[in-house]
Amino acid sequence: MSQGLSFPAFLQPLAGAYPFGITSTEGKRLDAVVRYAADGANLDDGFDPIARLAAHLFDAPIGLCTLVERDAIRVIGNFGLGGVRELERVPGFCASAVGQHVPYIIERADQDSRTLAHALVTGPENIRFYASVQLRGRTGVNLGTLCVMDRMSRHADPQALELLATLAALAVDRLDARSASGAATASAREEMKGGCDLLTGLPDRHAFEDELEHLRDQALTLNPQGAIVAIDIEGLTLVNERRGRDAGDRLLRATADALRGAFEQDEQVFRTGPSEFAVLTGSAWAGDFDRHKGRVDAAMHTVRLVGFHEAYARVGVASLDEGETPRTSFRLADWRMYAEKLDRR
């Protein structure tokens, strides 16, 4: 924005040393965003189910989970907006919402002075409705937004907004877990390379992705049976904060051991992220959520018995034949895990 361009009236109270009408605390906020981005490797992987669930809450076609960076808006979760992973940082939508501390609502974007010239409004997306809540980090600064968009003008349902705020808190929990795990030791990211997670001894995310590709190739000649169990461990951030990161590492090792014991020898357990695990099961009981959830619960009971009373798990299950590919089945399991988290929050 050039120095000669004045801010719209609604941004003038916030205008100053920082672009886009953001407050003087922008430097502190950007520092926090940079730390999360540096510590939480592969942030673009794992937040799509949150965006999808946000859209589902509003029965809207688009949901986004974003980090508002210095020069751009990084889309870490995307449902309904193609493969977009970055948006231009201009006022009106997320770039303005991140400076607020209450839900940010645009009901008629084509008539609202804040957004009527925005490319999302004037361009092919034809956005008319926008509702967002802020992703507030541990230090109290806003990292980004969880938002929904629609191509029709509409009112924001208060109950849906309340649930959106709850879902945003879950998104921050995942950001915190990834950041805490990523900063735990210098070797943490190295342990997730080469097919084996050195911390837990489990096959890592790379090995999991390879196995999904193998199952996809099998499907060309066979019809693979089984299910994918997506697991997210709650309490890791709390353990890291209260007892130190070595304790967090012990929690992850205890969880890996307990999951190996809870599932059969021919069922593969993977560590797929800082606090996430996945299991590929055989044909028996493929879609039986209660059975798989019961086995994960039994594993976490063991983890609590060895001293990690803060830890519990959220679980989502999808049969391999529910998705077009094993990868889409995994996304479905991941989405169900977040739906279960929101339902029980």
Image (cartoon, rainbow, N blue to C red):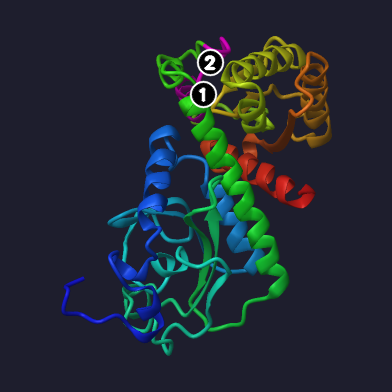
Is the stretch drawn in magenta largely helix, strand or loop? helix
Q: Is residue 265 above or below residue 320?
A: above
Front in this rendered view, residue 132 or 124 = 132
Q: Is residue 62 left or right of residue 243?
A: left
Of the residues shown, which amino acid type is indicated by label 1? Phe
Front in this rendered view, residue 140 or 80 = 140
Q: Splitting the image into 4 quarters, where does residue 72 fall?
A: bottom left
Q: Are marks 1 and 2 in contact (CB under 8 Å)?
A: yes
Magenta highlight on residue 111: no
Magenta highlight on residue 202: yes
Which type of secondary structure does the marked residue at label 2 adopt?
Answer: loop
Residue 270 image position (x, y, % from top left): 58, 20
- Find disc 1 in the rendering and name its residue: 208
Taking the spot 81% from the left edge, 27% from the top edge, the residue there is 297
Quadrant holding the N terminus: bottom left
Residue 238 image position (x, y, % from top left): 66, 32
Residue 36 can be seen in this image: yes
Q: Splitting the image into 4 quarters, where does residue 286 fall?
A: top right
Q: Which residues are magenta?
A: 199-216
**Label 2: how many Cα within 10 Å (few below 14, some 14–19, many 20+):** many
In the picture, the disc for residue 203 is 2
Of the residues shown, which amino acid type is indicated by label 2? Pro
Q: Is residue 173 left or right of residue 37?
A: right
Q: CA distance from mark 1 to mark 2?
A: 7 Å
Q: Is residue 322 left or right of residue 134?
A: right
Taking the spot 67% from the left edge, 19% from the top edge, the residue there is 251
Along the polypeptide, which appears first: circle 1 or circle 2?
2
Residue 315 image position (x, y, % from top left): 72, 36
Q: Is residue 179 above or below residue 136?
A: above
Residue 50 image position (x, y, % from top left): 58, 51
Taking the spot 47% from the left edge, 27% from the top edge, the residue there is 182
